[in-house]
Structures are given as structure tokens and as C-alpha cells.
Image: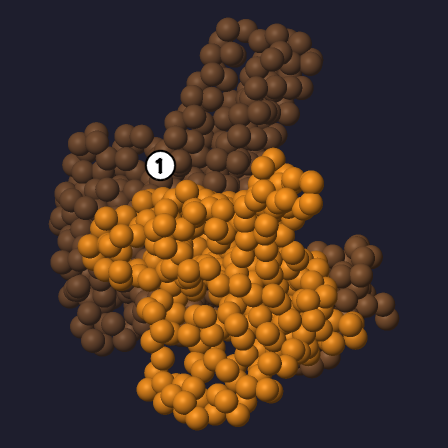
Chain colours: A orange, B brown
């Protein structure tokens, strides 16, 4: 029990540290931590300049994670991400050596992932799903923990390659970054223009080691779930496949796994050893919003994924 | 206490309260639904004659109660439900998770249980399960529960009719039971080695009984049931005699015994039948005579004791068979007044006169056609003799039922204090003709005379009254009638002589 409390306290401290650098985005920070504890990948959707890179850098530093940023462009090749085998001459000896790409890090920021070609995008698939990279018939394991934080711009769609459903499904959750409120914006300006340099030294301080994070991930995976809660989760998933004018395709079973894993992480953060109905309902939004394919009616009526999920949750009340 | 026991204890406590809550809720809903049904039923019964409506209402309530109990039993919460319900008080599904992992011994299950117990210490007092449903539901349920009961007390014509049907069915039921006994006795008697004639006789009896049974089953009024019962009584006596006769003629001892037994059974039923009729309306005698119960007592006795003979004379009055009957039925005494009125609604005067046997004239005079059917029954009690006289005087002469007892008086007069419903048995004497010289009515051959036997009154119930007191009261009434000029001229002396004769 003490060990649990200790880890939880450490996590709380990390969260507080991140919030010092990231103004606003309360939900985003919490959900980011939840995804990290679940061992999943995140798709961040938001306008440029909202602090996505800053968020990744901060998280990386606080958790002592090696973080890399990959700017996706249309001419980016898969090898540019995964690494490539190069010819090496050392004296009389000629060898082919694998040079690791930027994907070999703990925390990857895949910036504007939808700007790369599908071929390059799919190069991320194996890394995200299996945690390995295969090059020249050899499979290389990625360091643990391994997280991908991909971003995409929701408005600039020209010259982009929207991620196919199969690839979207590999992201544990999708977080929508919103424009900060006036007060938050003001704080951001003060922070970036006046205090940043002063706080630099302190900011770099690592609070949580990689090993601690891995232990926390192990603990989260053991969180208990009661049968009625699991039933509730299944009902929600089934509801995405029921006749609904705003849904073209419902969520996959991987969506249910995502909800469960996120709910576990939420329970851990809140100091519980079991999942509650509320955890499941809370996790449904980030886990399902990119998995539900909206219908033409929803698009024309301006119904968002979150609105559809809200209606689904309303149709599935908690039964006690 | 072990961690698991402590968690289970809490879940059981919650389950108990949930069960009570469910029970009360189901009872309230059942009260709402079934009371509504009951109210509609009672409302209908105010306009439609529905017998046994009180029992039906009780059955509706009983069904509601039973439904609620059954529903709540089948919907009783399980421990799992109780755990879930407890979680809704801020436990965030800790209890249900702990309950499901009670048997598990892993580190995580242990930690989860400890976490649940810690939370219980803080939050247990917050578990407050409201057992009673909302007031909005309880109040209408209570009101609706009482409404039909209150509505039962609203008197309407339909409710009265319903009660009458109820009484009729009660009488019919008793009579049918007797009939079945007699039928059984006849069945046994018929199994012997009997001659064709004997069998035919028994078959005839059975047929009569079947007919009576059919009539009783269809009886919608007490009068019809009583009339049929009266006829049955007569038939029983006849059958008894007939069976005894057949027993005497039977050669075989065994057959004779069987027939004798049957006769005995039938005779018993005849006796019982009389009793039952009397008990069917035990209060009618006295109620008819609030002032002169003594008279009725005597009257009834005399009726039984063959004053019918005299009545026969009254019957000869022919025109007024009513009086004849009433003679037999001293019980009705005063109530006779009303009795007449009821029959001869037109004749209020007659009604009054009906108090006195003498006024039988009037009864006849006015009753006329009706009296042919014997309705006027006013039973002026002991004064039948005078009734007879009146018969003589009767100018109505319409007594088509000129038989001895012209008219099948069905004395159902009402007294001031209550109903003097028909209290007698009747024996039909088909087409008997009086042979009294004073008979002035015409014999049309259509009249059925009824002989009545009083079975009511105080004496019937085993009470005794002083004859002098009765006579005194009658005398007083008669004289006051003379003083009031209630009687026809020329009759005063007859009345005085009558009383002087005692």
C-alpha cells in the first residue's frame, strides 16, 4: 500500500510540475498522464502554436524520457523515421550497420503526421503497435517506455493525407487542444516572455525516473474492474453500433480496450484500486472520438464526435 | 471481524433496506392500481346491481396485496444489487468490486478490500436508503385505498337490488343443497328393485326437484327464491308422503327400508326448509310490529295451527284472497297495512284499513285484480276471521281466485320500521273452490290459492308473549280506528262484538 501511495504522490508531483509550464489544458495534462500510464499513444489535434511541442518537451523532462520531434512532411521517407542501414568501411572490413532513426526514443512528437505520405505514416504503425522496428529483416526493439504523440492540424487539409481508420485506431486516444482562455493566454505570455529564462534551471529538473513510470504502468494494469462496470462499458460500445443517424461506423473492440485502460489509469490517479462507472464514462470521450466514423448527416448538421458520444452515454445510464 | 465479513455485513444491511423499500413501493403501486380498479368497480355497482360487491372489492384488494408481495419477492435485491446500491453513496464501485473479489487472495484484491474498508469507515454513515416512496405517491394511494370503501356506503337503487340478488342467491344456494340431498336419497331409493310405477313416481319427484333447482338457480329476487322454497316445502311433504306410501306397498323389505329412508330424508328437508326460510328473515315479524309484536306472535302460531281453515273462509272472501292469507300470517299484523299499500299502491286508505282484519273488505275491494294473485297480503294478523267477514261484504267480487284462500298472498308489506318481507311458506292448492255459502266471488278456475304458514315472529324464534297484551293492543287500535272513522259504517258493532267475544 505504501508503495502505491508513494508512486501516486510522485505522479501528483509530476502533474503539478507539468502544470507549472503548461498553462491551461487541465484535461489535456490529465489525459496525457492517463495515456502514458496506460502505455498508449496520443493523437493531438489542434491549431499550430497551442503548445504541443512544449507539452511534449516538458513531459519528457519531468519523466526523464528521451524525447524526439519528427516534423512530418510530404517528402519524409519511412527510413527517415525508423532509421536506415548504411554501408560502413572500417579498415579492410566492410559492413552494413543500422543507424537508428528518431523513432528510437521514449517520447516521440510526430508533428503534423497527416502531412506525410501514407507509406511514411504506416512506418509508424509497427513502432506504435509492437514497440519494434524492422529493418533489413532485423527487428529492433524500441526503448521502454515508448510513447508517440502525434499532432494534426484540423483546418489545413490541403496537401495532407488523412490518417486511415486503421491507423487512427492505433492511437489510444485523441485529445483536442483548444485555444486558451483570456486569463490563460495572459499567463502564457508572462511565462514565455518574462519568467521562462529564470525558471529554466528549475524546469529541467527531473522528478520521476523511467523506472518509476514503468512500475506505475505495471500497477495500473492490475486495477480491478467489477462485472457491472464491465457490462456498462460493453453497453456503451454496443451503442456505437446501434442504428444512429450520426454514426457511419461504430468503434472497434480496440476502442473498448482503450476505454478500459484509460479508466484504470484514471482510477490509479484518483487513488482507487477499482474502476468506477464514472471512470468508464470519462474515458469514453478520448477513447472513442477518433474511432467513431461520423455520417454525412452529422457532418452537415455540425454534430461533433463528442456530441455523438454524449448522446450515446445518455442512452446508456448507469443501472444500479 | 474479517475484512470480507465486514464488507458482507454492510451489503446485507443495505439489501434488507432495499427489500423493504421494494416491498413498500410495490404495495403503494398495487394500492394505486387495485384501488383504482376497486373504485371503478364500486362506481359501477352504484348503477348496476352487482351482488356480493363487498366480497368482490375485498377480492380486488386481496389480489393487489398478493400481487405486491409476489412482485416484491421476485424483485428482491441480490447481494450484488445491494453492493451496487451501496456504491451509489460515494463508494465509487469499491463495494461491488470488493464483493466480486471476496474469494480472491491476490495482492491487488487485498489492497482493494483494504481501500474499501477505509472508505467504509469514512462514508458508511452516508448510506441512507429512503424506504418510503415519495409523498406524491403515498397520499393518492391512501386516498384511493379508502375511496372505494366509502363508496360502498352510498345507497342507490342498484345497490339495494344487488343486495336483494345476494339474498336470493343465498336462499337458492341453501335450497339447492337440500335438493341435492333429497336427490341423493331418491337416487338411493331408486336403486332398489322397484316396480315401474314406483320408478316413475321417483322420476317424477326428481323432475320436480330439477325444475325447482333450475328456478332457484335463476332466482333474481328474494321473493322468487322464497316462493320456490315454499313450493319446495310443499313438494317435500308430498314426496315424503308418497315415498312412505310406496314403502308401505313395497314387497321387498330392503326396498321398503330404502324408500322409508328416502321419505325420512325428504321429511327432514321439509322441516329444515321451513327453518331456513324463517331464518332468512328473522326480524321481519317483529319489525313489522313495533307496537304489537305480541299479536304477530300469536298470529303466526295460529297460522301454523290451522287457522288456515278460517282463512279458508277468508279466502272465500274470494275477492280478497289477500285477507285469507293474512289471516294465516298473523305476523304481519300491522305491517299488513303497508303490504296492502304496496300491492295496491293506489289504495292508501285500504292500506290503513289493512291493519284490521275487518278491513279486509277494503283490501278486497281495492285489491281486486291484484288480489286475485294474492298480493295484498296485509295479513291483518289475528283478525283473519273478520277478514273473512269482509270477504262476504266485499263488493269487489273480482276475486277470480275464489279458492278458499283466494290469491297467493305474498305478504311483503313494509312496516314503518322496516321491511316485513314475505315470511311464509306457500302451498299451492290448484283450483280449489270454496264452498262457503257466503262466497260471492266468481270461480273462474284460474285462481291459485295459497295456504300460508307463518314461520316468523317472536314465537318462531322461541319467544313467548302474553295473549292478553296482544288482544289489548289490537282492541285499542280497533277502537281508535272506530273513533277515527277509519272503518266503514256498520262495521263498528262487528268490531266491538269481536273483541267482546274474547
Horizontal and vertical percent position of residue B359:
23, 59
Left or right of residue B31: residue B3: right
What is the crowding at mark 1: few (fewer than 14 residues within 10 Å), some, or many (at least 20)?
some
For this orientation, the residue located farthest to the front is A92
Query: Relative to residue A36, is residue A270 depicted above or below?
Result: below
Task: Tell me the residue at 39%/66% (across/down).
Answer: A176
Task: Tell me the residue at 53%/63% (across/down).
Answer: A68
The foreground one among B42 and A100 is A100
User: Is residue A241 something one can see in this rendering?
Assistant: no
Horizontal and vertical percent position of residue B411:
32, 52
Horizontal and vertical percent position of residue A273:
68, 66
Left or right of residue B214: residue A231: right
Task: Tell me the residue at 41%/42% (across/down).
Answer: A119
Task: Tell me the residue at 69%/40% (across/down).
Answer: A93
Mark 1: which secondary structure?
helix
Horizontal and vertical percent position of residue A265:
60, 64
> Within the image, what quadrant is residue B405 found in?
top left
Q: Name the residue under label 1.
A: B218
> Within the image, what quadrant is residue B11 found in?
bottom right
Left or right of residue B251: residue B405: left
User: Is residue A69 something one can see in this rendering?
Assistant: yes
Query: Relative to residue A309, is residue B450 depicted above or below?
Result: above
- Chain identifier of the residue bearing label 1 in the image: B
The foreground one among A253 and B201 is A253
Q: In which quarter of the image is the N terminus of chain B?
A: bottom right
Left or right of residue B31: residue A209: right
The foreground one among B434 and B458 is B458
Amino acid at each position: 500500500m505504501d508503495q502505491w501511495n508513494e508512486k501516486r504522490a510522485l505522479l501528483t508531483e509530476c502533474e503539478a510540475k507539468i502544470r507549472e509550464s503548461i498553462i491551461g489544458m487541465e484535461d489535456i495534462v490529465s489525459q496525457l498522464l492517463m495515456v502514458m500510464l496506460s502505455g498508449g499513444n496520443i493523437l493531438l489535434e489542434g491549431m499550430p502554436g497551442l503548445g504541443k511541442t512544449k507539452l511534449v518537451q516538458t513531459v519528457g523532462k519531468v519523466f526523464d524520457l528521451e524525447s524526439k520531434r519528427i516534423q512530418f512532411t510530404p517528402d519524409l521517407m519511412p527510413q527517415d523515421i525508423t532509421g536506415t542501414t548504411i554501408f560502413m568501411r572500417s579498415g579492410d572490413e566492410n559492413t552494413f550497420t543500422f543507424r537508428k532513426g528518431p523513432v528510437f526514443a521514449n517520447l516521440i512528437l510526430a508533428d503534423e503526421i497527416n502531412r506525410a505520405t501514407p507509406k511514411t505514416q504506416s512506418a509508424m504503425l509497427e513502432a506504435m503497435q509492437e514497440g519494434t522496428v524492422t529493418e533489413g529483416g532485423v527487428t529492433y526493439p524500441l526503448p521502454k517506455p515508448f510513447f508517440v504523440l502525434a499532432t494534426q492540424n484540423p483546418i489545413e487539409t490541403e496537401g495532407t493525407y488523412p490518417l486511415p481508420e486503421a491507423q487512427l485506431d492505433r492511437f489510444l486516444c485523441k485529445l483536442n487542444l483548444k485555444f486558451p482562455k483570456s486569463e490563460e493566454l495572459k499567463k502564457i505570455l508572462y511565462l514565455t516572455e518574462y519568467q521562462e529564462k529564470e525558471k529554466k534551471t528549475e524546469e529541467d529538473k527531473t522528478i520521476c525516473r523511467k523506472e518509476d513510470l514503468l512500475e506505475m504502468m505495471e500497477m495500473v494494469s492490475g486495477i480491478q474492474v467489477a462485472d457491472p462496470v464491465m457490462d456498462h462499458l460493453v453497453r456503451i460500445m454496443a451503442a456505437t453500433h446501434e442504428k444512429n443517424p450520426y454514426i457511419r461506423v461504430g468503434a472497434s473492440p480496440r476502442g473498448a480496450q482503450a476505454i478500459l485502460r484509460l479508466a484504470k489509469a484514471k482510477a490509479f490517479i484518483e487513488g482507487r484500486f477499482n474502476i468506477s462507472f464514472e471512470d468508464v464514462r470519462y474515458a469514453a470521450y478520448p477513447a472513442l472520438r477518433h474511432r467513431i466514423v461520423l455520417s454525412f448527416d452529422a457532418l452537415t448538421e455540425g454534430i461533433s464526435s463528442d456530441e455523438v458520444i454524449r448522446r450515446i452515454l445518455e442512452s446508456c445510464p448507469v443501472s444500479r | 471481524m474479517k475484512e470480507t465479513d465486514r464488507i458482507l455485513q454492510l451489503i446485507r444491511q443495505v439489501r434488507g433496506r432495499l427489500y423493504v423499500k421494494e416491498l413498500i413501493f410495490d404495495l403503494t403501486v398495487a394500492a394505486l392500481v387495485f384501488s383504482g380498479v376497486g373504485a371503478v368497480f364500486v362506481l359501477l355497482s352504484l348503477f348496476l346491481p352487482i351482488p356480493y360487491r363487498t366480497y368482490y372489492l375485498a377480492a380486488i384488494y386481496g389480489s393487489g396485496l398478493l400481487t405486491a408481495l409476489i412482485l416484491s419477492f421476485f424483485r428482491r435485491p441480490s447481494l450484488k444489487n445491494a453492493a451496487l446500491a451501496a456504491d451509489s453513496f460515494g463508494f465509487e464501485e469499491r463495494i461491488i468490486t470488493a464483493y466480486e473479489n471476496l474469494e480472491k487472495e491476490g495482492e491487488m484484491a487485498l489492497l482493494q478490500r483494504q481501500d474499501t474498508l477505509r472508505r467504509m469507515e469514512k462514508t458508511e454513515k452516508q448510506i441512507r436508503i429512503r424506504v418510503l416512496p415519495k409523498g406524491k405517491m403515498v397520499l393518492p394511494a391512501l386516498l384511493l385505498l379508502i375511496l372505494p370503501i366509502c363508496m360502498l356506503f352510498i345507497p342507490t337503487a342498484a345497490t339495494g337490488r344487488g343486495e336483494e340478488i345476494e339474498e336470493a342467491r343465498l336462499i337458492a344456494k341453501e335450497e339447492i343443497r337440500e335438493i341435492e340431498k333429497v336427490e341423493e336419497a331418491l337416487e338411493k331409493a331408486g336403486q332398489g328393485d322397484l316396480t315401474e310405477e314406483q320408478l316413475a313416481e321417483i322420476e317424477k319427484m326428481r323432475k320436480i326437484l330439477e325444475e325447482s333447482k333450475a328456478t332457484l338457480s335463476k332466482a333474481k329476487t328474494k321473493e322468487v327464491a322464497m316462493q320456490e322454497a315454499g313450493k319446495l316445502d310443499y313438494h317435500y311433504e308430498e314426496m315424503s308422503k308418497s315415498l312412505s306410501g310406496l314403502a308401505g306397498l313395497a314387497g321387498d323389505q330392503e326396498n321398503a327400508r330404502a324408500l322409508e329412508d328416502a321419505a325420512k330424508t325428504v321429511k327432514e328437508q321439509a322441516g329444515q326448509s321451513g327453518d331456513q326460510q324463517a331464518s332468512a328473515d328473522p326480524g321481519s315479524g317483529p319489525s313489522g310490529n313495533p307496537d304489537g309484536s305480541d299479536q304477530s306472535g300469536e298470529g303466526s302460531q295460529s297460522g301454523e295451527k290451522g287457522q288456515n281453515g278460517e282463512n279458508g273462509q277468508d279466502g272465500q272472501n274470494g275477492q280478497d284472497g289477500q285477507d285469507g292469507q293474512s289471516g294465516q300470517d298473523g305476523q304481519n299484523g300491522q305491517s299488513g297495512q303497508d303490504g296492502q299499500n304496496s300491492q295496491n299502491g293506489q289504495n292508501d286508505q285500504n292500506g290503513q284499513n289493512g291493519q284490521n282484519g275487518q278491513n279486509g273488505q277494503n283490501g278486497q275491494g281495492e285489491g281486486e285484480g291484484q288480489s286475485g294473485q294474492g298480493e295484498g297480503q296485509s295479513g291483518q294478523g289475528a283478525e283473519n276471521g273478520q277478514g273473512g267477514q269482509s270477504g262476504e261484504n266485499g263488493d269487489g267480487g273480482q276475486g277470480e281466485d275464489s279458492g278458499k284462500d283466494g290469491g297467493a298472498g305474498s305478504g311483503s308489506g313494509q312496516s314503518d320500521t322496516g321491511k316485513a318481507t314475505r315470511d311464509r311458506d306457500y302451498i299451492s292448492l290448484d283450483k280449489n273452490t270454496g264452498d262457503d255459502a257466503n262466497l260471492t266471488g266468481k270461480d273462474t278456475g284460474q285462481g291459485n290459492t295459497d295456504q300460508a304458514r307463518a314461520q316468523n315472529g317472536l314465537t318462531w324464534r322461541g319467544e313467548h308473549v302474553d295473549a292478553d297484551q296482544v288482544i289489548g293492543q289490537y282492541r285499542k287500535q280497533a277502537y281508535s280506528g272506530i273513533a277515527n272513522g277509519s272503518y266503514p259504517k256498520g262495521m263498528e258493532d262487528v268490531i266491538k262484538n269481536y273483541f267482546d267475544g274474547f
